[in-house]
Image (cartoon, rainbow, N blue to C red):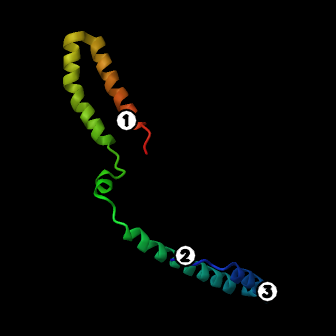
Amino acid sequence: MTIPRLPRDDLTAAMAARRELGPEYDDAFIETVVDRIEEALDARSSAAEPRARARPRPAAERFRGDRDHSLAMAVLSLLAAIPLSAISVINAGLPGLMFTLAAIVLINVTYTFRPRP
């Protein structure tokens, strides 16, 4: 199915008619051209809608989607930070705690700025 276009010849003829009629008919001319453009846009959108609805998305694509999992990653990082901090403080003291927290921050930053397909 082809998408209807607003013919350039029609616009050229309308511009020539506008020049002949003079400035007192500018409002009518503009209204006519805008109506024609709206008709062409409506026809394009109605022609594009059935194609978009016709193709069902595969189940894997529906569930994967383009969701952003940053909040889930942040919550899981906080949950993991509690026991990991306790273990690192007990075994390595303050340097161990700093290393553990830096690793968690690095993982979150890497996840946030990863390249997305």
Relative to 81, does residue 6 appear above or below in the rendering?
below
Q: CA distance from mark 1 to mark 2?
A: 42 Å
Q: Secondary structure at mark 1?
A: helix
Q: Which residue is mark 3?
A: 22
User: At 28% across and 12% down in the image, what residue appears?
Assistant: 94
Q: Quadrant of residue 50?
A: bottom left
Q: Nearer the viewer, residue 68 or 62?
A: 62
Q: Amino acid at mark 2?
A: Ile
Earlier in the chain: of badge 3 and badge 2, it is 2
- Quadrant in which residue 49 is drawn: bottom left
- Where residue 111 sits, quadrant-wise, is top left
In the rendered image, which quarter contains the C terminus?
top left
Q: Position of residue 18 (x, y in %)?
A: 76, 85
Q: Residues within 10 Å of mark 3 (few under 14, many from 20)?
A: few
Does residue 32 appear to the left or right of 74 in the view shown?
A: right
**Residue 111: mark:** 1
Q: Give the amino acid at mark 3.
A: Gly
Distance from label 1 to label 3 (Cα)? 63 Å
- Does residue 90 appear in the picture of this structure? yes
> In terms of sequence position, does the residue under pointer 1 or pointer 3 come before the other?
3
Q: Residue at x 19, y 12 (%)?
A: 90
Separation of disc 3 and disc 2 at Cα? 34 Å
The nearer-to-camera label among 1 and 2 is: 2
Q: Nearer the viewer, mark 1 or mark 3?
A: 1
Q: Residue at x 43, y 36 (%)?
A: 113
Between marks 3 and 2 in the image, the one whose residue lies nearer the viewer = 2
Q: Residues within 10 Å of mark 1 (few under 14, many from 20)?
A: few
Residue 61: image location, x then y, percent: 33, 55
Residue position for label 2: 3
Could you say whether the residue bearing mark 3 is in a helix, strand or loop?
Answer: loop
Q: Mark 1 or mark 2, which has the lower sequence index?
A: 2
